[in-house]
């Protein structure tokens, strides 16, 4: 069933590994943090499991009492280390524009620190209508519900849970740490290989 014509089409997108490939930038930021603190961080492992909040990842490398401080430091070095190396995922701009071409709004809902997420979108020319940061998994539902998002697109099973908590259609893309089987098991209604397939899917969906 397509979207109800009585309200504006609003589509939410995750950021890391959905709209942007932030692995090179995140690796660089963690390498800076490791150099400053003298703490070993397996940056290859870190970037293989992006999605959950920063605090969750930092807890794997630092004692609990240090997590808040090192997260603050990470966020502070992030603009200089992580923005330039990060690239747009294939089809990212076109996916956002496909929503807008149908008269809809494209919103980004991410666990990432919002000021740094904003820098990514501006640097890469991804023209989302709205950005909300600091939300993960089911926590994303509050923003999706507030803005009437009927679809949420993401690469992680946490994104599927967030979509369902908001009573939105979950569209999974297999560009992140979760493969098709994991996304399907989590309950994603639609699974695409990447965002290049999204505009055609959206046009078909909206027309039904």
Image (cartoon, rainbow, N blue to C red):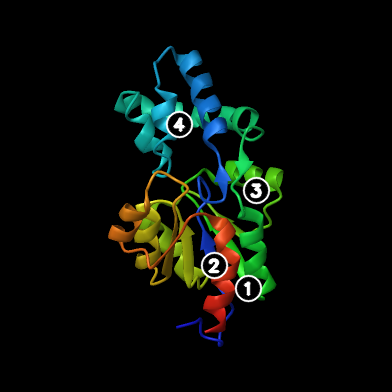
Q: Do the residues labelled 1 and 2 touch (CB within 8 Å)?
A: yes
Q: Residues within 10 Å of mark 2 (few under 14, many from 20)?
A: many
| Mark 4 or mark 2, earlier in chain | 2
- Residue 87 in the image: state x and y as whole percent: 63, 40
**Residue 27 visible from this viewpoint:** yes
Q: How crowded is mark 3: few (under 14 residues within 10 Å), some or many (20 or more)?
A: many
Q: From the viewer's perspective, tell me whether residue 92 is left or right of residue 53.
A: right
- Residue 135 in the image: state x and y as whole percent: 44, 52
> Looking at the image, which residue is at 63% across and 73% down?
104
> Looking at the image, which residue is at 52% across and 77% down?
205
Q: Residue 71 carries which label?
A: 4
Q: Do the residues labelled 3 and 4 touch (CB within 8 Å)?
A: no
Q: From the viewer's perspective, tell me whether residue 6 is left or right of residue 142.
A: right
From the image, state whether disc 3 or disc 4 is nearer to you: 3
From the image, state whether disc 1 or disc 4 is nearer to you: 1
Label 1 vs label 2: CA separation?
8 Å
| Mark 1 or mark 4, earlier in chain | 4
| Mark 1 or mark 2, earlier in chain | 2
Label 4 vs label 2: CA separation?
30 Å
Is residue 180 shown above or below 71?
A: below
Residue where numbered disc 1 is placed? 104
> Looking at the image, which residue is at 53% across and 50% down?
15
Residue where numbered disc 2 is placed? 11
Secondary structure at badge 1 equals loop
| Mark 3 or mark 4, earlier in chain | 4
């Amino acid at each position: 069933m397509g979207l109800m014509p009585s309200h504006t089409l609003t589509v939410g997108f995750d950021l890391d590994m959905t709209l942007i490939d932030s692995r090179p930038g995140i690796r660089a930021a963690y390498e800076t943090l490791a150099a400053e603190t003298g703490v070993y961080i397996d940056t290859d492992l870190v970037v293989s499991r992006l999605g959950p909040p920063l605090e969750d990842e930092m807890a794997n490398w630092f004692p609990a009492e240090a997590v808040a401080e090192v997260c603050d430091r990470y966020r502070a070095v992030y603009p200089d280390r992580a923005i330039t190396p990060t690239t747009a995922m294939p089809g990212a701009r076109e996916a956002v524009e496909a929503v807008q071409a149908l008269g809809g709004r494209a919103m980004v809902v991410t666990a990432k620190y919002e000021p740094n997420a904003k820098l990514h979108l501006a640097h890469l020319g991804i023209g989302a209508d709205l950005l909300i940061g600091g939300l993960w998994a089911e926590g994303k539902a509050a923003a999706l519900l507030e803005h009437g998002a009927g679809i949420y697109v993401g690469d992680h099973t946490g994104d599927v849970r967030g979509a369902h908590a908001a009573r939105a259609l979950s569209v999974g893309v297999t560009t992140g740490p979760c493969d098709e089987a994991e996304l399907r098991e989590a309950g994603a209604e639609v699974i695409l290989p990447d965002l290049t397939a999204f505009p055609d899917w959206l046009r078909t969906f909206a027309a039904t």
